[in-house]
Amino acid sequence: MNTKSSTTRRDFLVKMGQGAALAATGGLIWSYLLNQQARATPFAIRPPGALADPDDFNARCIKCGQCVDACPYDTLKLATADAGIPIGTPYFIPREIPCYMCEDIPCLKACPTGAIDPALENIDDSRMGLAVIDIENCLSWQGLRCEICFRECPVQGKAISVEHHPRRISKHAMFVPLVHSSDCTGCGICEKACPTEEAAIRVVQPELVQGKIGDHYRLGWTVDTPITQEFEIRGKPDAGDRAPPTGLDYLNEGPL
Amino acid sequence: MNDKQQSVRLGPNGKPVRYFVMPDSLSGKLQVWRYLLLRRAVQLGLLLLFFGTVNWDWKIAEQPVLTGNLSSSELLGFLPLADPFAVLQIMLTRQIPQQEVLIGAAIILAAVALIGGRTWCAWVCPLNMVTDLAAWTRRRLGIKDVFILSRQIRYTVLALTLFLSALTGVAAFEWISPISMLHRELIYGIGAGWIAVIGVFLFDLFILRNGWCGHLCPLGAFYAVIGKVALLRIAFDTPTCTHCGECAKICPEPQVLNIKAASVAGMIASGECTNCGRCIAVCPEDTLKFDLRHHIQNQQVPNTTESQQRRAA
């Protein structure tokens, strides 16, 4: 009786141990896979309004493809297992088919989970990515009159402007496109339109290319910089009664 | 077959034990295959509806027929449907999804509770066709299991899914599910997901009988839990059963065909039953049939107590 109960107890403990070992091993491999997958390409170009934090988006997206169905231009795709993008999530490749920025944003309306944030009302406020120009390969930057990206841009004049730029070999100026992150939606129409063999303007995630000046810099000459310091005028400046310099002058005194 | 029939054996009800014989006539075969054919029609039909809506713009009254996929979809532009297990995982990542998908999940949850938890597995899941093919091939080739694994392990996988969803912040099963990979890639374009599907097929074929659906799949385990209260069940008519064992031979979850438990409950009570109807097709005595839970229980109450008393004595 005693031996029997101790065997069953031992059996039970062994079973528990086996179960725990299996669960722990399986869980480790599984969570490794999940981490690999979820961090596969945090910089995939997502549909307009997709939650900005990739972790939030990855957690919320149910991988149903209703945004893909809703897209009238077949821009969006669902990542297959080998796409190198978190599996089953929607993305697009601007050079193939860009986002044509529908005003009613059907992909956003189709999303059942809120992975594409319904708070986005104006498509111009979407930030799918940021266009960047490779000035070494941009035709305009070589002095040719291209400017196709500027003319194709749906937020024309705001997201891409054309500026003149001095040219080294002649007195004629170059007209070069510049992207402004304040207005670029990352739709990728410029990337699609770029006539170079490989697009010289392409959409990337801003985190990849954008720097940050730092809050402690005050650009006093810009209009929107607030004046944070009070300047007091101490008395009337008088040319005849100029106060002697009050700074220390010890370097000029005494022996060297 | 013939050898079996010649040996006259009596069942516990005193009747000679008969065995299942596949009828020669086509109509007889169709009769045997009726649930199988119906299941394939539902599985492929659903797949076709999803596929047609995305790829051929199928519409009824200006509305897309069935957008999305089994994770979450919308029927005719107004009725949201969603996989309650996927939504549960998302909520465990501490994200509160939008109302639409919650309503969809509630609808499917209610439907599943009505028609029987794992009915989903046998009638909707596209991977079921793959694992059924593996099981069929395996029967044909007579392949033996490489090892034995407890069928309870699926509940561990289920618990692990929920735990890992909370831990890693992504819906743990949705990210590796071969079901989703197969379904998604059939509808939205083929990628490397078929490797996972082939993996499941080979595992089921060479390593473990019903290895994926019957042992590992946490979605099946989730529906099995719901199936415990589900309405549509397989009724078991105890007096006619001769214990021939044909049902258990064909059943992908043979542990649910516990004759003792079935005669007590008057039905296959286990949530692990997938309502595939194979047992109904092969039963030579018509002991088994589809019925509703409350209906069965009302009918069988006197029988149940009697048999329980007999067993207790």
Image (spheres, rainbow, N blue to C red):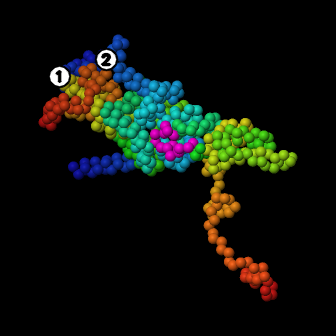
| Circle 1 chain | B
| Left-right relation of A31 to A127 | left
Residue closest to the eye, B167 or B53? B53
Amino acid bearing label 1: Gly
Q: From this viewpoint, is residue A228 visible? A: yes
Q: Quadrant of the C terminus of chain B?
A: top left
Dominant secondary structure (helix, strand or loop) of the stretch shown in magenta: loop
What residue is rendered at 79% in x and 43% in y? A142
| Circle 2 chain | B
Kindly identify which residue carries mark 1: B14
Q: Residues within 10 Å of mark 1 (few under 14, many from 20)?
A: few
Residue closest to the eye, A105 or A17? A105
Kind of element beneath mark 2: loop
Amino acid bearing label 2: Val
Q: How many marks?
A: 2
For the record, the magenta segment spans A108-123
Q: Please determine whether, in this image, residue B137 is positioned above or below residue A182.
A: above
Residue closest to the eye, B152 or B303? B303
Instruction: Give the residue furthest to the top.
Output: B25
Q: Quadrant of the N terminus of chain B?
A: top left
| Left-right relation of A196 to B194 | right
Kind of element beneath mark 1: loop
| Left-right relation of B302 to B5 | left
Q: Quadrant of residue B109?
A: top left
User: What distance separates the C-alpha of mark 1 from that of mark 2?
Assistant: 21 Å
> Residue A165: x percent and y percent?
78, 49
Kindly identify which residue carries mark 2: B21
Do tags 1 and 2 sit on the same chain? yes
Instruction: Give the residue furthest to the bottom.
Output: A254
Of label 1 and label 2, which has the lower sequence position? Answer: 1
Q: Please determine whether, in this image, residue B64 is positioned above or below residue A148.
A: above
What residue is rendered at 41% in x and 33% in y? B79
